[in-house]
Image: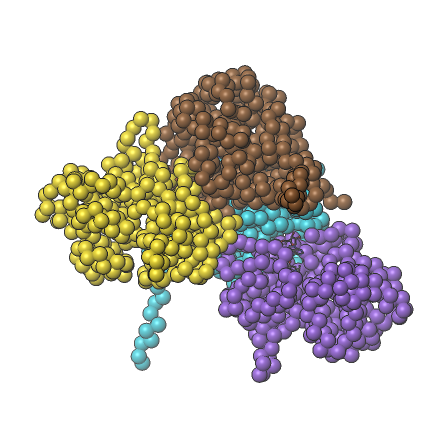
Chain colours: A cyan, B purple, C brown, D yellow
């Protein structure tokens, strides 16, 4: 029999796998919370198996109704949102969504939200016992909730406290803390979370912004202000990821305006162990898959065997 | 449903900022149900502004001239801002990203005729967009559609011919009196409902919020069912961002419905008309 | 003689004038420091008489060389810069540039910078005695200077101190304080400056950002980080202007991504008494003139007699 | 100098990403001096990305076929990123914002021939752009230009014909040996200078930083003057933003020169070659 030329041992591709707090990710590309629903919404547009992980929409113990509309507005290379933590609640997620997600070979990270410390602890405790969840991402940084809510990202001591408490409430799950960019020095918050036992940091959430309809003279969002995301904020996000990487030893996950393979590479070079694709999912539902494939292709064409050769490889001018 | 790179086949200027855009996409065209929409990237490159895709109702199925098979979709696009401006100035042959058909269209169960014999289709301006496919489906079900079509001025009353070709009654009105009755489209509708105090009428409305609200109130007043095709700013158009909601009186801790997924067509009684979503 | 139809008394245009700390501005449009050189560079591209004021490039007492290149990089709807306070020094400005500027019927505001408090005081004292300067704008918020420099915008107490000292050093000139957006709560800094005697606040300076060349793996700017400006930051700027307007009683001057008449209107509606056009000058040298004309046209077509009907007119949803 | 809305007259593909773009703008064309550039908005709308205009050297004056009067400018544009990509795909008739002519060109005093009889023009790739108008001016002054033209491969050696038409000597080189000598353009130049150890030679270089640096070092080694046409990222192109600087050994507390205003053509000895500005 003639040997099939395609029958050789396959060329070993570059190694894209990364580890975050003991959990293996097949590649460093995930989707960002709130921009990918509960994951399954995207299954018909892309291969969910192609990405390292899915961070689902922020969950609270009880469902949260969210803010009245209008909730979104597009700005130059970005968008504002004031969804207001609308979610179906952790119990319904575990029952209705998680089983479907478990059919895919990718990690599931649950972003958790709450108005009070006790609410965070409740959802953390609840999720701790559920198989199929690979990490919790503690969202202490969402700007779009009413004045009543606690703000654990205004003072590093509060960040420390909530991190430590949630850490205790869900001992089984790796804990990522997602930081706000709306601070004077993100490193203080990064260090506080690290000291309190965070396993990784997600950097950044949205910048607080506003837009006004000059015709009606009303804010474009009924909540008045909203979170700015998308390519517009990428330079700020990249700077903060770089700063955070200098300040802590735990892994940093880069987020903010990532929509191309090059964008992802910038964050990895700055030191991020992994990245999350956010707003880009909205205008290109398969963006995360394309970026994951793009990283593999980049490594191949640049003869990079392992993605770790890229991570933290920022050089300086001579 | 599908995310495709599609080609613009033609852009026809209908005046007053309105354009009929024909898009080649057989796979998507085959799946369309009346009231659904597409999310269209208004510029060629993904990274270009506007970033977010824009929702447009599928006005008609574009069919292959010879085989009659679905070859694409026709959209009625009114130029109102940066995205629509770019879209209506696109050249035939240009490629765009197109997601669809999306959303929840009109309720058209086969037993509809047992409850409904007359359908009042109420359009304001480009609100005409979802009503052609609806009218065709109603006719196929042997429900009689009547079109109430209003606009600011005669130039807003675009694309009447396809309805005329279906042979249905069209009652037009314009605010400046340049065509049909002078005034709001809800006036001839109200008059019709007064004259025909029947329960086998159903209302279908698409247009500005205030107009749909008025039609809803007429429906409630006459104890009729009413379906509305809603507009909202959309982030994703596929149910993930929760950006496109309307408030709903249906409680159960979930007072918001997604226009892109639970709509765009909804029973008007599911909508809280005191909270405009745009 | 037949009356010339054009010979009637001219229709009174809308009143666009605003007052800031006793100084009259013919309209609320100025150019932002560092984006308009020393003003004269733009004289051949637009009518300098058409705008309310010119804020010149940040001046120190002695010339500052600035940072090594590359100094600028374009990002999505924005740009990063790390010029590093390069300027010709206050003495040369007064001698070489100010006389030329005085030929125009517009206000001249001098932005002042320094590495140490004493340097600020020196330049403030020096400029205080020079006719033809209508206000000082105290720049305590530039991110693009080396680590040695003081940071008067990290702690409101420092903002208070430098404002009070400069206030004393230049008693003749109205003092505007330009605030940084890179803070947790801009209102604290706004109130500190107000209490210390600032006559007006300029909001905002650039956001700190970064970009990386994935090919060379070096930062796109040799200084590594830079200030992000342009339309990308407009939503953040507008939010901060609105917040500042709620927090203080002195006039606020809105800055950040303004490139159209609509942009300017958004800031005025949010409460800004005037606006500054920055990065837009680079890609459209006559942008400020076009916006000033645009405001007049907007008022005319909307039957607004006085720009004050717009300022602070933000409405809420019912 | 002037800020104009100009029309693209033609875009000619020269291969390997290079394009010759002809722009109609008589007023600007009349003012051009060799070595100057224009700042061109690469897209039609001011608010669109890329926001900042891009600098392009004026390769040639485009003249009215009949009258011979300046009708516009010709640019040689190599596609390297988002702006140039948009520019080279522009259609004739499209309108763009164009600022210029900007900057400080080559030193061409009328007494130049008393000091210089031979001018070595050294180009790397699109670095050819400023050298045609320079060569013409030198010829007019009766200084003899010789063109050293290097590229990676033969496809990079675009637009040789206009130089051939001037009848000047052209020495080409390519790194892959596909045209002329194999190697860097500085090698034949170095050889020429070795063979002609004269003081009445002046060097003029435009190309990648490393190439210009090497030419500068040859100039210093042979004690010759050298003018270089520099590149830097520009914010404004009119001297206001201080974004485009190169470091300069000239002290006086002002160690940076603006490429857009003090350049783009500078004496190579005014440049610190250890700090690459891009
Ligand atoms: C399900 C659905 C179907 C639609 N079908 C059609 C259609 O068939 N034909 C058509 O012409 N238009 C349709 N629209 C509206 C269309 O999507 C908007 O006009 C378009 O998104 C405006 O984009 P732009 O960039 O031109 O405007 P922008 O520059 O974004 O905004 C310009 C102005 O338009 C208004 N606007 C923008 N987006 C929306 C929106 N999503 N809904 C309501 N108002 C908006 C805003 O008040 C804004 O001030 C539909 C909207 C939805 C939600
Ligand atoms: C005075 C001057 C004259 C020039 N003349 C010509 C010319 O005649 N023909 C021509 O093709 N090009 C010329 N250039 C270079 C041209 O301006 C850049 O190629 C262009 O700005 C790139 O824009 P872009 O958006 O396509 O690239 P970007 O997407 O902005 O960048 C792509 C890559 O190109 C490089 N680059 C970008 N801008 C510059 C720049 N200003 N200088 C150097 N490298 C840059 C960067 O390294 C970057 O990685 C000139 C530059 C200057 C300063
Ligand atoms: C519509 C929307 C909803 C979001 N919801 C959440 C959320 O529930 N929890 C959270 O931690 N971040 C949320 N984010 C923030 C994103 O996860 C991400 O941090 C941010 O958008 C920046 O990334 P991007 O620029 O790629 O979008 C949301 C963002 C958007 C645009
Ligand atoms: C190249 C550049 C130089 C600047 N230099 C100064 C400066 O010297 N002093 C200052 O207070 N602000 C400086 N700024 C900030 C601007 O004045 C303005 O606050 C900022 O750019 C935001 O406005 P914009 O988005 O309209 O550009 C500079 C900005 C740019 C882009
Ligand atoms: S548009 Fe995103 S959920 Fe409807
Ligand atoms: S490009 Fe702005 S000073 Fe040269």
* Residue placed most toward the observer, B124 or D266: D266
Residue extending farthest to the front is C1
What residue appears at the point 49 percent right and 54 percent down from the top-left corner?
Answer: D44
> Measuring 58% from the left and 29% from the top, which residue is drawn there?
C201
- Left or right: residue B139 versus residue A75 is right
**Residue D230: in sight, yes or no?**
no
Answer above or below: position of A317 versus C98. Answer: below
Specify the quadrant that holds the C terminus of chain C.
top right
Name the foreground residue: A310 vs C284: C284
Residue A26 placement (x, y as % from top left): 46, 56
Q: How far across and down, in percent of the image, does residue D246 sit?
A: 33, 38
Outermost residue on the bottom side: it is: B66
Could you tell me how many numbered marks the image carries? 0
Q: Quadrant of residue D263?
A: top left
Residue D163 vertical position relative to residue B162 in the rendered view, above or below: above
Q: Give the side of residue D137 with respect to residue A158, left or right.
A: left
């Amino acid at each position: 029999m003639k040997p099939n030329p395609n029958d050789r041992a396959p060329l070993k591709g570059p190694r894209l796998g990364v580890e975050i707090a003991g959990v293996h990710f097949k590649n460093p590309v995930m989707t960002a919370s709130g921009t990918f629903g509960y994951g399954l919404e995207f299954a018909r547009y892309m291969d969910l198996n192609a990405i390292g992980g899915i961070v689902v929409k922020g969950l609270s113990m009880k469902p949260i109704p969210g803010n009245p509309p209008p909730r979104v507005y597009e700005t130059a290379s970005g968008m504002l949102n004031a969804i207001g933590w609308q979610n179906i609640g952790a119990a319904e997620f575990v029952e209705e969504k998680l089983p479907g997600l478990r059919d895919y070979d990718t990690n599931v990270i649950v972003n958790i939200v709450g108005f009070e410390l006790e609410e965070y602890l409740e959802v953390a405790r609840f999720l701790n016992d559920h198989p199929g969840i690979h990490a919790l991402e503690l969202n202490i940084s969402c700007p779009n909730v009413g004045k009543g809510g606690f703000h654990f990202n205004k003072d590093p001591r509060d960040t420390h406290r909530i991190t430590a408490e949630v850490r205790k409430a869900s001992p089984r799950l790796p804990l990522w803390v997602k930081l706000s960019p709306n601070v004077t020095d993100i490193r203080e918050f990064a260090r506080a979370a690290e000291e309190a036992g965070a396993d990784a940091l997600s950097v950044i959430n949205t910048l607080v912004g506003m837009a006004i309809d000059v015709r009606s003279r009303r804010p474009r969002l009924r909540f008045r202000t909203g979170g700015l995301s998308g390519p517009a904020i990428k330079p700020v996000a990249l700077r903060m990821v770089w700063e955070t990487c200098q300040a802590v030893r735990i892994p940093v996950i880069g987020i903010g305006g990532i929509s191309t393979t090059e964008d992802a590479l910038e964050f990895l070079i700055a030191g991020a162990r992994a990245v999350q694709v956010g707003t880009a999912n909205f205008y290109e539902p398969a963006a995360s898959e394309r970026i994951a494939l793009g990283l593999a292709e980049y490594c191949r064409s640049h003869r990079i065997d392992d993605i770790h050769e890229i991570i933290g490889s920022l050089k300086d001018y001579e | 449903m599908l995310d495709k790179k599609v080609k613009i086949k033609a852009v026809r200027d209908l005046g007053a900022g309105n354009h009929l855009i024909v898009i080649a996409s057989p796979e998507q065209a085959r799946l369309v149900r009346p009231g659904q929409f597409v999310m269209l990237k208004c510029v060629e490159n993904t990274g270009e502004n506007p970033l977010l895709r824009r929702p447009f109702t599928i006005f008609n199925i574009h069919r292959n001239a010879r085989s009659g098979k679905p070859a694409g979709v026709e959209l009625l696009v009114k130029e109102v801002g940066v995205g629509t401006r770019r879209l209506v100035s696109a050249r035939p042959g240009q490629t765009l990203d197109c997601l669809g058909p999306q959303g929840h269209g009109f309720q058209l169960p086969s037993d509809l005729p047992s409850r409904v014999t007359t359908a009042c289709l109420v359009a304001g301006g480009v609100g005409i967009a979802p009503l052609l496919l609806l009218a065709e489906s109603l006719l196929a079900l042997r429900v009689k559609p009547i079109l109430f079509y209003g606009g600011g001025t005669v130039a807003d009353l675009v694309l009447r011919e396809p309805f005329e070709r279906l042979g249905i009654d069209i009652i037009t009105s314009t605010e400046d009196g340049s065509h049909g009755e002078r005034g709001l489209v809800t006036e001839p509708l109200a008059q019709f409902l007064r004259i025909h105090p029947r329960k086998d009428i159903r209302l279908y409305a698409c247009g500005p919020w205030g107009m749909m609200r008025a039609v809803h109130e007429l429906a409630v007043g006459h104890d009729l069912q009413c379906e509305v095709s809603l507009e909202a700013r959309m982030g994703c158009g596929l149910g993930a961002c929760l950006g496109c909601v309307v408030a709903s009186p249906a409680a159960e801790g979930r007072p918001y419905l997604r226009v892109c997924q639970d709509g765009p067509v909804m029973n008007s009684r599911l909508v809280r008309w005191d909270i405009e979503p745009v």
